[in-house]
Amino acid sequence: MNIISLFSGCGGLDAGFEKCGFNIIWANEFDKDIWETYRINHPSTFLDCRSITDIDAGEIPDADGIIGGPPCQSWSAGGSKRGIEDARGKLFWDYIRIINAKNPKFFLAENVKGMLLPRYGNILENFKESFKSAGKFGYDLYFQCVNAADYDVPEERHRVLFIGFRKDLDVKDYAFPDPTTPDGKRINLKSAIGDLTSEQPIGLPNGISSDRNHKVPNHEYMTGGFSPIYMSRNRKRKWDEVSFTIQASGRQAPIHPGCPDMIKLGQDNWIFEKGKESLYRRISVREAARIQTFPDNFEFKYNNINHGYKMIGNAVPVNLAKIAAESVKNFL
């Protein structure tokens, strides 16, 4: 089945659908820092680089499905919290606009759990009703918040999924799959990145990129200071745990699990162990990609190391995307 990808980023959601046999024929991404990465990893997909607001739906090819994750910063509990008042929050309506025009058999939209905050209640209901009434036939809408750690991803990552099937297809009783890695069976950091300890990563300051002369591409980490906000809580998970959420910033990257533990002095006050400060480092770009379940042959291109973390942190974990794709395919 042919798929249209909106707000594609580097293509984590796309990669998961491709693994399930879907064909991404057209994608849209406005951030110029991502274009090279998307193209090198999705060579068969046409990438439209304009803002979605400037694209008429008639310029987009017809397809069986539409997938995408409209920008989430406006809804994030750690972001601006401006929701629909933010121009990025309004882009959700462009996603619905394209569905209205193209009438795909199904759609999948992903966003942050912050959308569920009470302050956005009316907006969320408007989105749901707009999805249900979209296009010529309307859609049966299924809405769920999932934790990626429950679905083959070594990371605590709560995300909202909107999945819709066109009403004339009469898809009934859809349910997102039961957890494949429930609590107690989750994939830990040792399994995800433990083998990378044999290769010493390269430390790079923000704004600089190495020649990526590694056995495993992008195994380099951002150096530099740690802000008081960063040091306000524990940033290190142990080898036998899953990772904290991978965020879209190198400055916010978790501490590598092989480092000494952080020490709590009081509320919102953590420090590195005295005398061992030099042993602490952020996880590398490749380690972040592994945690987000990107394969090692998925290479990230950037001139600023922070852009590597940003692409990965904004992506849908590939394994979660694959499980979602399989469930959609089975019901179709």
Image: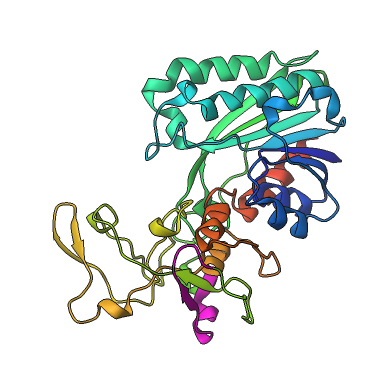
**Which residue sits at x=62%, y=39%?**
176
Q: Is residue 234 a member of the stretch shown in magenta?
A: no
Rendered-image quadrant of the N terminus: top right
The reply, left or right, for residue 72 in relation to residue 82 is right
* Quadrant (top left, top right, bottom left, bottom right) of the C terminus: top right
Observer-nearest of 321 and 31 = 31
Identify whether 5 is placed above or below 90: below
Q: Is residue 187 left or right of residue 225?
A: right
User: Could you tell me which residue is drawn at 69 percent across and 30 percent down?
Assistant: 52
Is 141 in front, or is 88?
88
Question: Which residue lies most toward the left here?
Answer: 266
Task: Look at the picture and state if 23 lies above or below 59.
Answer: below
Residue 203 forms part of the magenta stretch: yes
Asked where in the image residue 77 lies, by quadrant, the reply is top left
Q: How far across and down, in percent of the image, does residue 38 sit?
A: 72, 53
Q: Which residues are magenta?
A: 192-208
**Is 3 above or below relative to 96?**
below
